[in-house]
């Protein structure tokens, strides 16, 4: 078993580069979920030199098995998948952009509609946040209304953060506590209204008196757990009754439990569904699919971008989806996810540690049932790093993960849980406690 020293981790090339990054890049990284402070401050490797399969090499060429978030869930086939990369290289060799459109965007549209027979039209972006913004724009154009009711996380755009303009804790139960809507126009106040998942009564209460002003209801149909089908049925009925567009944000849940959106497992179809992350195995690609009646309203407004026409994203998405279907990736990642959840439960029972295991097998998570959960979780991450694993409270399995990887992980978790159960947690903590939300990073 590998054993990387803490002192060496603190002086690693990745940590040194990150200190420089914080002086050059506001917030240190482009994505909050990749900030080292979210995992193990001062020791998380921060940067990679290579990634292949489910393994990552840091800037010092240390090798880790990624048993954490796999590119924030984007690399569903594994890092640098040969079939996807070959399709991308072929697209590059034939020109990734030109004055004409790439034929792949039509092929991908056909493929997405084949997977989702209820949908009839498709638009593209290159990231999930902008795809959600496009979906909201289309819904507002279609209904000629302004207000949006939402549940769950839907990106960084003005329409979403506007919910914190009037009530600074509106997003606390949806995204994270403490988000200030600085930079969001005050005129958007009361245009985005949150409600809690699986709470139709709260939705109706929030909508009371403004039904004819609601353009869209956007939700993650499932994120942590399976969605109650009755809830989705009621949601669809309510949206139809008030004339609002129902949008399913499948950026996280799409392709995690089946080929396509998880809503297919429930038999409840929205007016619009949004995909990103897993759709192209880490390449920049996102799609908005929907009924012709709603999607055609995109032509009554202006939605356009040069980089939405490049060839790499669609080529990667086509190769990813075809391989996903051919190799029955859903079955594999469900089995791997279930096995990892079992590892957590078995070892917690063995070492008499109280934990809570949650989530779909492909979006699994655990937490320590203790007041100092975040301290214990930071220690878990540090101890897993010592043993050559990117380990975290979440696990997003990929097609590249094998039963052998799970077996190695099992041995490491056994050792780490033993240490946590038998040693004072403060002695094991050799860094600050990991962040749980948005923290302001100052220059160092």
Image (cartoon, grey):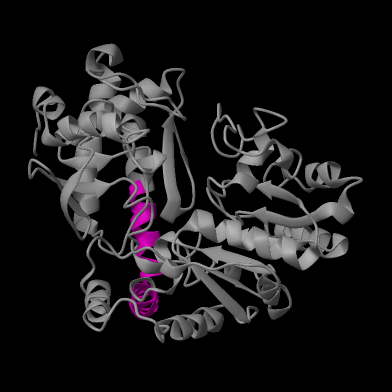
Q: Does the magenta portion include 330?
A: yes
State which quadrant residue 135 falls in.
bottom right
Query: Residue 192: x, y in percent?
Result: 71, 44
| Residue 124 left/right relative to 4 | right
Q: Can see residue 174?
A: yes
Query: Residue 109: x, y in percent?
Result: 51, 81
| Residue 228 left/right relative to 3 | right
- The extreme right residue here reads 209
Q: Nearer the viewer, residue 330 or 108?
A: 108
Query: Residue 147: x, y in percent?
Result: 77, 50
Q: Residue at x 76, y 40 (%)?
A: 190
Q: Main secondary structure of the magenta part?
A: helix
| Residue 80 left/right relative to 169 | left
Q: Quadrant of the N terminus?
A: top left
| Residue 336 left/right relative to 14 | right
Q: Residue at x 21, y 60 (%)?
A: 53
Q: Residue at x 46, y 62 (%)?
A: 276
State which quadrant residue 280 falls in.
bottom left
Task: State which region is magenta.
Answer: 314-340
Q: Can see residue 415?
A: no
Q: Nearer the viewer, residue 394 or 189?
A: 189
Query: Residue 77: x, y in percent?
Result: 31, 65
């Amino acid at each position: 078993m590998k054993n990387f020293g803490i002192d060496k981790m603190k002086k690693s090339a990745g940590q040194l580069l990150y200190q420089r990054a914080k002086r050059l890049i506001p917030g240190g990284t482009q994505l909050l979920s990749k900030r080292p402070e979210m995992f193990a401050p001062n020791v998380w490797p921060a940067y990679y030199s290579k990634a292949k399969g489910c393994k990552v090499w840091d800037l010092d060429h240390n090798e880790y098995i990624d048993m954490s978030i796999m590119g924030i869930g984007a690399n569903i086939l594994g890092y640098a998948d040969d079939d996807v990369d070959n399709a991308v290289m072929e697209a590059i060799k034939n020109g990734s952009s030109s004055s004409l459109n790439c034929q792949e965007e039509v092929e991908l549209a056909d493929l997405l509609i084949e997977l989702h027979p209820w949908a009839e039209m498709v638009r593209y972006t290159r990231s999930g946040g902008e795809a959600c913004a496009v979906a909201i724009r289309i819904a507002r154009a279609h209904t000629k209304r302004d207000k949006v009711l939402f549940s769950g996380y839907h990106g960084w755009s003005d329409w979403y953060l506007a919910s914190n303009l009037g009530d600074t804790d509106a997003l606390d139960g949806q995204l994270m506590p403490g988000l200030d809507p600085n930079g969001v126009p005050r005129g958007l106040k009361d245009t985005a209204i949150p409600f809690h998942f699986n709470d139709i009564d709260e939705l109706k209460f929030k909508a009371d008196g403004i039904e004819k002003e609601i353009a869209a209801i956007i939700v993650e149909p499932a994120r942590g757990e399976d969605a109650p089908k009755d809830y989705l049925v009621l949601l669809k009925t309510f949206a139809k009754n008030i004339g609002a567009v129902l949008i399913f944000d499948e950026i996280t849940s799409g392709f995690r439990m089946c080929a396509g959106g998880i809503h297919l497992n429930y038999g409840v179809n929205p007016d619009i569904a949004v995909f990103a992350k897993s759709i192209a195995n880490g390449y920049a690609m996102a799609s908005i699919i929907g009924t012709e009646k709603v999607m055609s309203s995109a032509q009554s407004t202006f939605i356009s971008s040069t980089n939405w026409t490049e060839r790499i994203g669609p080529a990667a998405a086509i190769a990813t989806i075809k391989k996903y279907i051919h190799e029955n990736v859903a079955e594999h990642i469900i089995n791997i996810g279930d096995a990892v959840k079992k590892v957590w439960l078995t070892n917690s029972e063995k070492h008499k540690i109280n934990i809570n295991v949650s989530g779909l097998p492909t979006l699994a998570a655990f937490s320590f049932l203790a007041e100092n959960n975040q301290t214990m979780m930071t220690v878990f991450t540090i101890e897993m790093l010592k043993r050559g694993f990117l380990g975290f409270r979440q696990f997003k399995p990929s097609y590249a993960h094998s039963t052998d990887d799970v077996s190695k992980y099992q041995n490491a978790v056994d050792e780490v849980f033993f240490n946590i159960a038998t040693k004072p947690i403060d002695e094991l903590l050799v860094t600050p406690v990991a962040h749980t939300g948005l923290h302001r990073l100052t220059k160092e």
